[in-house]
Amino acid sequence: MKLRKFNKTGIQRFEDFYNTLTTQYPQSIPVNILTDPETSEAIKPDIEIEKRSFENRFELAKYLNDVLSKINEPNIEHDKGLWVWLAVYYFDQLCPFDNEGRRKPGERARWIPASNNYQKYYRHLLAGPFRIFRAHRDHPERARVLLVKSIDSPGDIYEQLASRQEIVTNKAIIEAATLMYLDKKSSKAKRGAAGNRAGSARRLAVFWNQFDVTWDLYSMTTDEILSILPDEFNSFKPSSL
């Protein structure tokens, strides 16, 4: 299908559909609004977008980065019409039926990006991972631990680190997080990396706030960041340190 984006009418039509999902009479996905000229408009140049399955959020973000890099639009991550259109296009994967045959879409920000509110913008199921991948596109692997979950489930590590712009844009600390919390064999997060146990990603976010007062963390290397972390992180640190 040719990539398009919604106009205001298209966004409203999606929101009308979204509002039915928590009622007794949820509607079917309004796929017709994807191509209806009354609700969507073409993007130039013409770009094909594929309906494919993604193993995780990293693969999703990589694919979107490859596709959207063909568009000469520096602020594409803030194009609300585009991201809502993509959310509808991939809706079945982003919001699958549960065991009772119902969809649980979650909060509005997962579908309609809160472009002017970073504390919510990262929650968009597509724009959030895309923005992280793009911020680390010189070496995307450093951010892999943030994007290891399935595309409909961001996970606690993502929630703790992506929600803080000063953390997610710091290459050294994100690489440190991946070195500590990513299991290289399974390509999944290590056990205990999520939650509130000692050394978890949640604790890393807490210590960031403390260290940021006394250390210039943006000038530090990944090894330097790892070296100043307290002993509670030792079980997660790479053995080479």
Image (cartoon, helix red, strand yellow):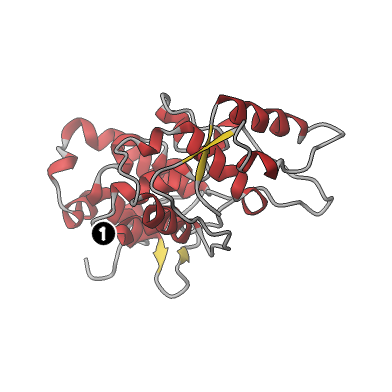
Look at label 1 and name its amino acid. Answer: His
Question: From the viewer's perspective, is 205 left or right of 40?
Answer: left
Instruction: Judge whether residue 179 can be spotted in this image.
Output: yes
Question: Is residue 192 shown above or below 165?
Answer: below
Q: Residue at x 25, y 44 (%)?
A: 170
**Residue wearing tag 1:** 139
> Which residue sits at x=38%, y=53%?
65
Percent across and percent down for residue 18 are: 69, 33
Q: Position of residue 205 (x, y in %)?
A: 37, 40
What residue lies at 71% left-to-right and 28% top-to-bottom?
A: 16
**Residue found at the far bottom of this picture:** 185
- Helix, strand or loop status at disc 1: loop
Can you tell which quarter of the image residue 151 is in? bottom right
The N terminus is located in which quarter? bottom right
Residue plotted at (61% across, 42% down): 34
Name the residue nearer the viewer: 177 or 33. Answer: 33
| Quarter that holds the C terminus | bottom left
The location of residue 220, given as percent across then percent down, is 14, 47
Q: Position of residue 171 (x, y in %)?
A: 24, 49
Compared across the picture, whether 112 is left or right of 167 comes to: right
Instruction: Give the class, few, some or many, for how many residues have Cα within 10 Å of label 1's Cα (few <14, many ≥20).
Output: few
Q: Is residue 229 visible?
A: no
